[in-house]
Amino acid sequence: MALEDDIAFLDRIPTLHLLGKEALRLLAISVETIKLSRGDILFEEGEPADGGYIVVSGELVLQNANDRKGEEPLKAKRGTLIGETAMIAETLRPSTAIATESTIVFRIPRVVFIRILEGEPQAATALRRLVSSRIARVMNDLDLVRPLFEDAESER
């Protein structure tokens, strides 16, 4: 893809869209393109994660050791951002990503993403707001299920 096509593609990713055009231009210049064949493993569960990936074409299946038998695995198709947290924080991969067909992904190293945020304060502010709202939602969800755990604890 041409640079302008890459920028337009990245702009369609909800988390990245809020960064703004200039940050997306820097990101498009900095991504690494990785080509996978069917059956290739992009990363394995438990590995240290040093950035995120965006599926440009093809498909990845995400398998976790805790997946239940007969349960349909998660699939990542065009436009899916994988490892969003790993772009800003040290973490481990929660699953193994395997190409189910010929697949192309963009790799966004954490160090590159953080440099872009450092150079684009408005992008960093927008991302901070997104993360804050997600944390607030999770906390609200925890408040909803807490009584269930408290009831189970009191029954013991």
Image (tube, helix red, strand yellow):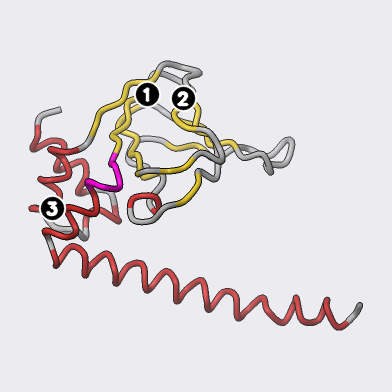
Q: Which mark is residue 23?
A: 3
In-front residue for pair 150/50: 50
Question: Quick one: label 3, few (<14), some, or many (20+) residues within 10 Å?
Answer: many
CA separation, marks 3 and 1? 25 Å
Which percent across, then down, holds residue 112? 22, 46
Mark earlier in primary sequence (2, 3): 3
Q: Can residue 65 be found in the magenta stretch? A: no
Residue ID for mark 1: 103
Does the magenta stretch mainly form a helix, a strand or a loop?
A: helix
Q: Of helix, strand and loop, which one carries label 1?
A: strand
Give the residue pinned by disc 2.
99
Badge 2 amino acid: Ala
CB atoms of marks 2 and 1 within 8 Å: yes
Q: Residue at x 32, y 67 (%)?
A: 130
Range drawn in magenta: 108-112
Q: For mark 1, does the 10 Å Cα neighbourhood hold few (<14), some (14 to 19), or many (20 or more) residues? A: many
